[in-house]
């Protein structure tokens, strides 16, 4: 049986290059797969508490909050890394508002 962490990792790995998804979308899809309630906060905790070797191979930078903002902006270094990774994938980031431009054009929602 898959754990919540396993499902979140698998879903995060399925977010395509130059796209991004939301904590809410991951939580909703994980809830459907596992038949239990997963909240966006749980997704955030799982992604932020991963070991360094797990983090390196997972495109965590493709996960943002439901309004299209980079959630790590209180942690300047992490925010900067996430912004740089998104820019490498041609995702447009507004550096003044810390939000993603053209959110509706590039957000990736999972199909149940």
Image: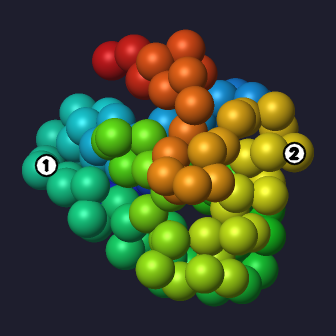
Q: Which mark is residue 47?
A: none
Q: Is residue 75 above or below residue 80?
A: below
The local secondary structure at tag 1 comes to loop
Q: Residue furthest front?
A: 96
Residue 111: x, y in percent?
39, 16
At 28% from the left and 66% from the top, the residue drawn is 42
Residue 7: x, y in percent?
44, 50
Q: Nearer the viewer, residue 97 or 8?
A: 97
Residue 11: x, y in percent?
52, 41
At 87% from the left and 45% from the top, the residue drawn is 88
At 13% from the left and 49% from the top, the residue drawn is 36
Circles 1 and 2 in contact, beta carbons < 8 Å: no
Q: Which mark is residue 36?
A: 1
Classify residue 92 by image quadrant: top right
Give the mark toward the camera: 1 or 2.
2
Crowding at label 2, few (<14), some or many (≥20) Cα neighbours within 10 Å?
A: few
Q: Is residue 45 above or below residue 8?
A: below
At 55% from the left and 22% from the top, the residue drawn is 102
The local secondary structure at tag 2 comes to helix
Cα–Cα span, label 1 and label 2:
35 Å
Earlier-in-chain disc, 1 versus 2: 1
Disc 2 target residue: 88
């Amino acid at each position: 049986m898959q754990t919540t962490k396993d499902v979140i990792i698998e879903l995060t790995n399925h977010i395509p290059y130059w796209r991004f998804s939301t904590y809410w979308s991951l939580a909703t899809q994980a809830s459907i797969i596992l038949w239990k309630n997963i909240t966006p906060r749980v997704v955030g905790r799982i992604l932020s508490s991963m070991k360094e070797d797990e983090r390196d191979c997972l495109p965590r930078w493709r996960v943002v909050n439901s309004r299209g903002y980079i959630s790590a902006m209180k942690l300047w270094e992490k925010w900067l890394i996430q912004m740089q990774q998104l820019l490498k994938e041609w995702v447009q980031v507004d550096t003044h508002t810390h939000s993603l431009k053209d959110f509706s054009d590039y957000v990736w929602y999972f199909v149940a």
